[in-house]
Image (cartoon, rainbow, N blue to C red):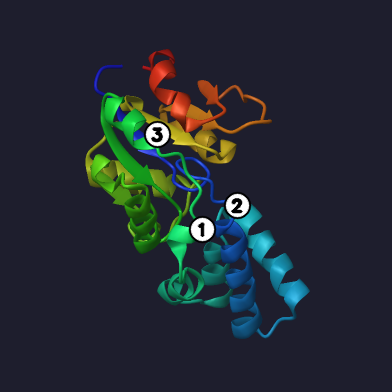
Amino acid sequence: MSHPTWLFDLDNTLHNASAHIFPHLNAAMTAYLERHLALGHDEANALRMHYWRRYGATLLGLVRHHGTNPRHFLAETHRFEKLHEMMVFDRALGSMLRRLPGKKLVFSNGPRPYVDAVLDIMGIRRLFAATYGIEQLHFHPKPSMQAFHRLLDSEGLEARRCILVEDSAENLRTAKRLGMKTVLIGRGLGQPPYVDLKLGSVLALRRTAGRVL
């Protein structure tokens, strides 16, 4: 595949969100459900997880079943006083991305201001032609087909010329159905048949890219 377009997930793909950021977000979302749905802590936490598993994002369940304003939810739950202190990433990432041939975009279920802030802290935002947060996807999160079609249509891209790099196997399943090449980032995971390449770290992508091009 000459001159591919690389679509990169953000959290747990380009940086380690599990260390500090995800625990912060999970607590903030649970607290939001407690306040706005008048739930106890355990009930709110269980509902948050249920919507995340069912829809790919807690937000979508809240919008569908409770009429939650998505922009209000995102603004309230993605407040970080010291985001830079919570970031865990490898500084070699920028060098790898610069040497990777093809156009690059970020395709995230997170809100756009958060996506751009994380990329700025890592010093790699300028390496991407565009960044897509859930607002640009009309609040349809991956793995929904609507999210993928929104990005492809907005960028004028053909799925068969795109490579999705993700830590979520479910998101890669949708990508493969559309005809994309797929790269799974993660350790301790199997390699489903719809995954073309599995890597323990995104840093290995440059030297192994020929296997999906």
Q: Is residue 160 visible?
A: yes
**Spatial distance from mark 3 to mark 1, Cα to Cα?**
18 Å
Mark 1: few, some, or many residues within 10 Å (few <14, many ≥20)? Answer: some
Q: Is residue 13 left or right of residue 48?
A: left
Which tag, 3 or 1, sits closer to the chain's start? 1
Q: Are marks 1 and 2 in contact (CB under 8 Å)?
A: yes
Q: Are marks 3 and 2 in contact (CB under 8 Å)?
A: no
Toward the viewer: 52 or 201?
Answer: 201
**Spatial distance from mark 1 to mark 2, Cα to Cα?**
8 Å
Residue where numbered disc 1 is placed: 86
From the top left corner, tell me how far across and down residue 77 is, in percent.
51, 71
Residue 142's disc number = none
For image coordinates 56% across by 64% down, the residue present is 25
From the top left corner, tell me how far across and down residue 197 is, in percent.
51, 21
| Mark 3 or 2, closer to the camera | 3
* Secondary-structure class at tag 2: loop
The amino acid sitting under disc 2 is Ala
From the top left corner, tell me how far across and down residue 13 is, in percent.
49, 40
Q: Which quadrant would residue 157 be assigned to in this image?
A: top left
For image coordinates 53% across by 46% down, the residue present is 16
